[in-house]
Amino acid sequence: MTEPTRPSLLLVDDDERYRNRLARALDDRGLDVRVAGNVAEARAEAERESPEMAVVDLRMPDGTGLELLRDLIALDGGTRVVMLTGWGSIATAVEAMRLGAHHYLPKPADAEDILAAFEKGDNPPLEATQDYRAPSLARAEWEHIQRVLADTGGNVSETARRLGIHRRTLQRKLQTWPPKD
């Protein structure tokens, strides 16, 4: 008697401890999990054997999860992808969905969250697309500042330089709470 094949899943995240822990948990739930620590490894793994599902981190050292999402869909349109991010924004979530992601989850997500996202992504609720409201300009500005601040490792002076604003102005903006919308 042959063993039934397990669905394949490619897990792409640059955080080795998180990736290995999540891979074990998904393997325990019946998936054939392959892992990659960056975009280049993930592309090579997907070209070797296209996965049925993929879990892709948005930020990686050698590219973005959005680039990888585009490549995975181009390689095999049947690959279902869930995007993970610790620095998510509405704009990146919308872009990921537009590029073909089945779902978008904030980190840290566990195996149950990811499996539920694959199930939800197969049949997204119609009202979710009808109720979408663009973020306010203040919210988009706040999210952009947070992304640039993360890119500079929390260096306020470098962030201000990259944003083209005075350091004290940036410090005032950082002291406020994020806008509601």
Image (cartoon, rainbow, N blue to C red):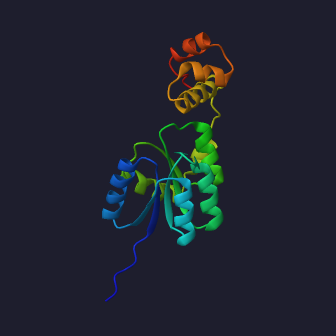
- Residue located 55% across and 54% down the image: 39
Image quarter hosting the N terminus: bottom left
Closest to the observer: 54 or 123? Answer: 54
- Residue located 46% across and 48% down the image: 14
Point out residue 116 in the picture as x, y percentages from the top left corner. 42, 54
Taking 30 as reference, is 149 left or right?
right
Residue found farthest to the right = 164
Res 23 quadrant in image: bottom left
Closest to the observer: 161 or 58? Answer: 161
Point out residue 95 in the picture as x, y percentages from the top left corner. 64, 45
Taking 138 as reference, is 41 left or right?
left
Instruction: Say whether residue 46 is visible.
Output: yes
Instruction: Say whether residue 102 is visible.
Output: no
Closest to the observer: 21 or 176? Answer: 21
Closest to the observer: 29 or 17? Answer: 17
Image quarter hosting the C terminus: top right
- Residue located 59% across and 23% down the image: 159
| 159 versus 40 height, above or below | above
Point out residue 112 in the picture as x, y percentages from the top left corner. 36, 53
Res 5 quadrant in image: bottom left
| 159 versus 78 height, above or below | above
- Residue located 55% across and 22% down the image: 179
Q: How many numbered callouts? A: 0
Point out residue 43 in the picture as x, y percentages from the top left corner. 57, 61
Taking 13 as reference, is 65 left or right?
right
